[in-house]
């Protein structure tokens, strides 16, 4: 009878990304040379590290071959991405924000890049949360001060690198 009792197909939902990722993929890029220089300074030149395309970096055990270093960096980033990517943001003396994750993986928000793109970061920071993510701050659930917004911005690059891990540089310690 004109499809009156016909079963309707269930509403289609967009496929869920697993692991969940932020909707925001910042178009601005931070200069990798400056990230490398800062990480070298922060580690006092005493550690090897690998840098991914979007500036995420992984501290490495010293003395690995290039192939071993790349493998170790990709495995470390994979572990962060496939667990809950807990972040520990820190204000550095130079004004940058270092965002640390487990497995010696971190990202950086360069202060001058943040300043230059602040209106975009401020506007988009809620899109920097992964799907269904709730972060509890002193201001409330998913309510962020400027420091938190900058940390979320830096964390976006980790998600971008984790979805397409490409080591572009391996830096060796000075010693």
Image (cartoon, rainbow, N blue to C red):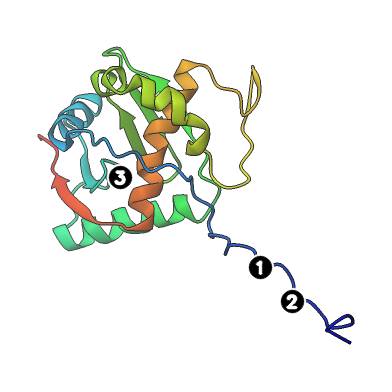
Task: Give the x, y percent position of residue 139.
Answer: 64, 17
Q: Nearer the viewer, residue 106 or 129?
A: 129
Q: Which dot marks residue 58?
A: 3
The answer to whether residue 111 is above or below residue 152 is: above
Q: Nearer the viewer, residue 25 or 5?
A: 5
Q: What residue do we see at 47% from left, 45% from top?
A: 23
Q: Is residue 145 left or right of residue 61?
A: right
Question: Distance from label 2 to label 3 (Cα)?
Answer: 46 Å
Q: What residue do we see at 61% from left, 42% from top?
A: 133
Q: Quadrant of the N terminus?
A: bottom right
Picture quadrant where residue 123 is located: top left
Element under disc 3: strand
Q: Are marks 2 and 1 in contact (CB under 8 Å)?
A: yes
Task: Give the x, y percent position of residue 17.
Answer: 53, 59
Q: Nearer the viewer, mark 2 or mark 3?
A: 2
The residue where tag 1 is placed is 12
Q: What residue do we see at 54% from left, 44% from top?
A: 130
The residue where tag 2 is placed is 9
Q: Nearer the viewer, mark 1 or mark 3?
A: 1
Element under disc 1: loop
Q: Is residue 128 left or right of residue 54?
A: right
Picture quadrant where residue 106 is located: top left
């Amino acid at each position: 009878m004109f499809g009156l009792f016909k079963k309707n197909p269930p509403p289609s939902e967009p496929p869920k990304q697993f692991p969940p990722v932020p909707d925001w993929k910042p178009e601005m890029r931070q200069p990798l040379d400056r990230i490398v220089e800062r990480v070298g300074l922060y580690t006092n030149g005493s550690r090897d590290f690998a840098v991914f395309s979007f500036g995420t970096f992984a501290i490495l055990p010293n003395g690995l071959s290039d192939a071993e270093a790349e493998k170790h960096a990709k495995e470390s980033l994979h572990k962060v991405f496939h667990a809950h990517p807990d972040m520990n943001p820190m204000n550095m003396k130079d004004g940058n924000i270092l965002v640390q994750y487990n497995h010696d993986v971190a990202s950086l928000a360069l202060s001058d890049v943040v300043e230059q793109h602040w209106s975009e970061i401020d506007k988009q920071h809620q899109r920097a949360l992964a799907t269904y993510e709730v972060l509890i701050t002193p201001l409330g659930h998913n309510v962020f001060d400027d420091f938190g917004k900058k940390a979320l911005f830096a964390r976006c690059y980790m998600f971008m690198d984790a979805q397409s891990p490409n080591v572009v540089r391996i830096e060796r310690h000075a010693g």
